[in-house]
Amino acid sequence: MKHTNDRRDFIKKISLTGLGLALTNGFTKTYAGTTGNTLVDRRATIVGLPQNPSVPFVPQRAASWWVTIEDLQWSQKKIVDKIKRRAAAFAEAEIDLAINYGCHIRFDFSNYFGQLHGYMANVCDELHKYNIKFMDHYSCNHVERPRGEEEFKKLHRGQRHHVLLFHDPKAAAFAQYEGHLFNDICEVDIRDGSRGYARQYQMETFCHNNPGFLDMHARYLERLFKEVPIDGIEVDDMCDYSGLTTCGCKYCRDRFKKDYGHEIPAFGEKSFWGDVKKPMLQWGNYENPAFRDWLRMKTDVIVDHVKMVKRIAGDKPLMSCCSSTGPIVLNGISLDLEKMAPYLDFFMLENVGTNVKSVDWTHMDAEALNQKDIADKRGNAPAMALSYTIYEKGGYFGWALSRFWGVANWSSTHNQRLEEDPADAKEMEDVIRPSNLWEVKHSPMKAREGKDLVEVRVVNNKLCKDNGWRDDEGQEHWTHAKTWSKKLLENNIGYRFVRYEELADAPALKKDQTPLVLDGVGCVSDAQFSAIKNYLAAGGKAWLALPFGTHDGKGFKRPVPLSDELRSTKYKNLVFIDSITRSDVLSKLIAQGNLKPVIRQIAGDKGWVARIRIYKNKPVIHLMNTALTGIPHPSIKDNSGISILADISSKIENNKLQYEIHTERIKLTDLKVSSPELAENQRNVAVFKSKKGYSTFNVDLNGIKVYAELINAV
């Protein structure tokens, strides 16, 4: 079997192929430690977490600082000299945040923390000379433990970027840090009592709920902050890659009983586990409230872990990794960014992919804007998109996506994801330098200062995901939400998501006069329904596609759907519509006058999409190509056998476009076309009045394949 290595494909593969995988007052404050000593539960010390995000700096142009096994030879002169050269090169490339990449499975390096921290401290010192910040980035809750020769070889084929220096099976039995034996703090597989194992990554998994593990991680964090002057930290993989096979340790069993009143049933009990002959991420009987509570408990313990990390990090920004937030399948690995969000300071979408398929990007728009809203509701916290590449064109493509989405860019080469480095591999700073230099010289807009033009609000209610809700056709709520995303994107209509908390906040709903889309929102809490009715009673506009409110916020089926009450009340601005998954309802709404798009393409080939964003009261129109073609490298393929992206072409033939814009919504003067693909050149765009309240303009995008922006000519 061939395997890709990115996080989103990991979720997809274990779903399809079945590969194995807020502090409550009730915490007991002490446990018996692994050495027989009394151990303080670090969660019991969490007090006074900040209400607002810690934002001592705002990154705009981040890049990965790659660490190799050779760097553990610090402080040899060769290593020190390399640090100096790279720091200078990062400065020349206008990188403002370097993020550590390598030595990733951190406790694999417990015997070498002195050398590693010395190296990172040296890196910080050199970067700080150029006012470049440094953020550490690691996975805390795993150790590499390949099981058998084939797993060992697979690890070395696909996970070289971790820097592989793990214990062999004999040494692993004694591996420890600060007195905590790794084997004693692993998750317990519910099936057979073995240690939890994430087969896709060849890792054994520590239990987020084990006080020994939490103490070990806390001690490590305290040491890290003491020994290395890092400016922030990304603690990766705040989820459970062993999935629904874990955790059956005594701490998890006790907590499930204490917090939710349930025992973990024997594995295979169908009323709880569902059909365990299916792939693991399809296990579970969502009709059983105990199973839904089990999923909640699993994310509870991860959130408590995040709280602990934030307490120790203090004013240093904390970030975690997340490639997905929408689909039900995330329940299987307990990945819940929205639940962690109150304790994070920066937010990052992992826009994974280095092969030719990555240029097909429109499906990522929903994830990007959902996570952007999570950051926005966390006090406009800095948001960034991480894009992987091997060559410069992929770096530019990732940069362009970040610009289109209105977030900071984190660029990362990923040569080590391949079985061997390409002979013509480039340094990280060389890949992103051209895009960064163009940005600084020609378009130094700050992502955090931009505000998207919003014409439609699309509800994405997390409660539907949490409760595993699907409609009669088997479609989940996220499918409806992301279909709206795609259709709005294709029609150049600005949108944002309304998530579960805002949906329960009537004043927040009433602040915005744009239509609220409620499509396939099966689970609706009482608080959400009250806010929606309040909004509708005040004249708020909403488009509602059934089913709606068939279940409550905890996943229990209601005797009567809430839609019945809405129908009988006959709110003035409530429009019942077909689901967008079944018909072209958006075109109908536009034709009926329910929506008048601000910008509309009236000539030229379709394929370019426009997004309007306001910077300091001035509009900028970002244009991104949705009809890209990846040009494959002639010989290099990723581990799934797909060709690496070497260059990018476009399927669009007629790049002379004409747009009509609603000038009562957006005031435009004459514009100019600017793009890294035009280098120093710019093209003038005249804006002409057309019919009342509208203007038209012509845009020549010939010679531009990926991205352009229209900015005021004056």
Image (cartoon, rainbow, N blue to C red):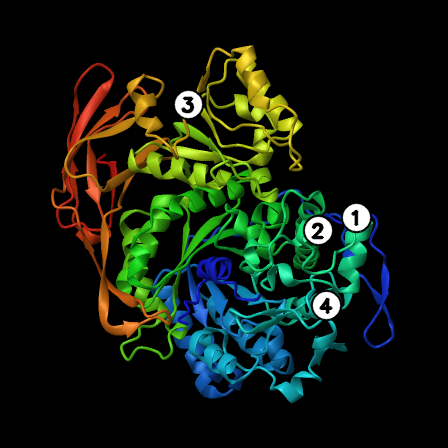
| Residue to which mark 1 is pinned | 259
Q: Is residue 706 left or right of residue 230?
A: left
* Label 3 environment density (alpha carbons within 10 Å; few <14, some 14–19, many ≥20): some
Q: Which residue is more in the foreground, 679 or 265?
A: 265
Marks 1 and 3 sit apart, C-alpha to C-alpha, by 41 Å
Quarter holding the N terminus? bottom left
Q: Earlier in the sequence, mark 4 or mark 1?
A: 4
Which one is in front in this view, the residue at disc 3 or the one at disc 4?
3
Q: Secondary structure at mark 2?
A: helix
Q: Please tell me which residue lies in front, 670 or 304.
A: 304
In this figure, which residue is indicated by the disc labeled 3?
A: 577
Choose mark 2 or mark 4, whichever is in front.
2
Q: Residue at x 20, y 23 (%)?
A: 695
- Name the side, left or right, on which 529 lies relative to 373: right
Give the structural element (helix, strand or loop) at label 1: helix
How far is mark 2 from mark 4, CA to CA? 18 Å
Residue at the disc numbered 4: 213
Q: Which residue is labeled 2 in the image?
A: 297
Whether residue 42 is visible: no
Figure check: 149 above or below 392: below
Q: CA distance from mark 3 to mark 2?
A: 37 Å
Q: Position of residue 302 (x, y in %)?
A: 66, 55
For the residue carrying disc 4, how many other residues have a C-alpha within 10 Å: few (<14), some (14-19), or many (20+)? many
- The answer to whether residue 423 is visible is yes
Q: How many marks?
A: 4
- Where is residue 629 drawn, in percent x and y? 22, 55
Residue type for callout 2 = Met
> Three-letter amino acid code at disc 3?
Ile
Amino acid bearing label 4? Phe
Q: Are marks 1 and 2 in contact (CB under 8 Å)?
A: yes
Q: For the residue marked with disc 1, what is the amino acid?
A: Asp
Q: Counting residues from the N terminus, which is met first, the one under dot 2 or under dot 4?
A: 4
